[in-house]
Image: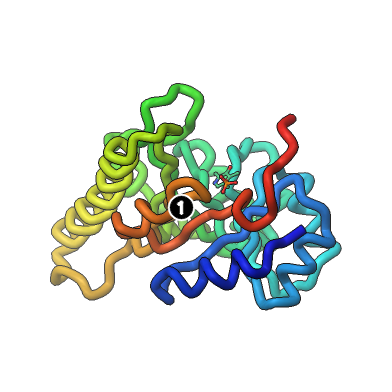
């Protein structure tokens, strides 16, 4: 079940420029349909096959966000319709996305996932890989790198979460500044990296304080997922 009241109060409580992505992984079509009916158009999914099935069944004006760990050999299934791939965590994956985009002549929106937590189970690039990928990305004509994504440590310590999100925000700024210096562009108003995808049910408030532009909210809206 989709919690309409929670969604409406969440929407009211955050600045209007922030996109709420309803993370619907493992949830049945009916739950997404309920959300769709009250106007939700951004959904986040973690599994390729599930995303493909939901895309086929549900209305075509939905923006589908892929937020999971994407394997290179599965990019082709989502390339034709995905709105934004959040978890691009290697140059290899970015090159594959470019290749699939080229095949269908579609420029695919991507966020680079940065490793900001202190947990080994999480994916992402470090600062050096980020700078490398940014510097070589102009050769990749069929990807559009719109920003960065990160997941904070799973902890109750708000200071740790805050410092991780603040670090991601600072990386976005320094990367934009560097690019403008290299290209001899005036500072702002058109930074390349605009989107900062950070914040989940437990930590979105801190993420917004730290400059998030996209929050990925699952359990708060759809209820707890069955642990698999
Ligand atoms: C599942 C998931 C979310 C949503 O998490 P909740 O805690 O349920 O809000 C957000 N981002 C990613 C990458 C996820 O895998």
Coloration mode: rainbow
Residue 110 placement, left or right of 139: right
Q: At x 32% / y 46%, what residue is drawn?
A: 165
Q: Quadrant of the C terminus?
A: top right
Residue 154 placement, left or right of 2: left
Q: Nearer the viewer, residue 133 or 87?
A: 87
x then y, percent, for residue 224: 68, 44
Q: At x 44% / y 70%, what residue is drawn?
A: 13
Q: At x 24% / y 58%, what residue is drawn?
A: 176
The quadrant holding residue 106 is bottom right
Q: Nearer the viewer, residue 147 or 219?
A: 219
Label 1: which residue?
Answer: 111
| Dot 1 alpha-carbon crowd within 10 angstroms: few under 14, some 14 to 19, many 20 or more | many
The quadrant holding residue 34 is bottom right
Q: Is mark 1 within 8 Å of ligand 1?
A: no
In the rendered image, is residue 135 in sight?
Answer: no
In the depicted structure, whether residue 151 falls above or below residue 14: above
x then y, percent, for residue 215: 48, 57
In the depicted structure, whether residue 200 falls above or below residue 192: above
Q: Nearer the viewer, residue 24 or 51?
A: 24
Ligand 1 location (quadrant): top right
Q: At x 53% / y 40%, what residue is drawn?
A: 93
In the rendered image, is residue 101 in sight?
Answer: yes
Q: Nearer the viewer, residue 4 or 131?
A: 4
Residue 169 placement, left or right of 113: left
x then y, percent, for residue 150: 42, 44
Q: Quadrant of the N terminus?
A: bottom right
x then y, percent, for residue 15: 39, 72
In the depicted structure, whether residue 144 falls above or below residue 224: below
Q: Residue furthest top?
A: 120
Q: Secondary structure at mark 1?
A: strand
Number of numbered discs present?
Answer: 1
């Amino acid at each position: 079940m989709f919690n309409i009241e929670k969604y409406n109060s969440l929407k009211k409580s955050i600045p209007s420029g922030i996109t709420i992505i309803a993370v619907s992984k493992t949830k049945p079509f009916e739950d997404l349909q309920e959300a769709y009916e009250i106007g939700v158009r951004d959904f986040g999914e973690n599994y390729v096959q599930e995303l493909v099935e939901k895309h086929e069944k549900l209305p075509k004006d939905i923006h589908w966000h892929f937020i999971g760990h994407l394997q290179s050999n599965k990019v082709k299934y989502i390339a034709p319709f995905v709105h934004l791939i959040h978890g691009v965590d290697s140059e290899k994956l970015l090159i594959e996305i470019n290749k699939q985009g080229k095949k269908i002549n579609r420029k695919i929106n991507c966020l680079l996932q940065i490793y900001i937590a202190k947990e080994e189970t999480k994916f992402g690039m470090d600062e050096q890989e980020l700078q490398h990928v940014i510097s070589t990305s102009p050769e990749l004509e069929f990807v559009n790198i719109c920003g960065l994504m990160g997941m904070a440590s799973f902890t109750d310590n708000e200071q740790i979460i805050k410092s991780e999100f603040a670090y991601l925000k600072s990386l976005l700024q320094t990367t934009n500044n560097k690019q403008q210096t290299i290209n001899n562009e005036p500072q702002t108003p058109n930074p390349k990296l605009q989107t900062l995808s950070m914040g989940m049910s437990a930590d979105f408030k801190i993420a917004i304080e730290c400059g998030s532009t996209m929050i990925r909210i699952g359990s708060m809206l759809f209820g707890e997922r069955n642990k698999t």
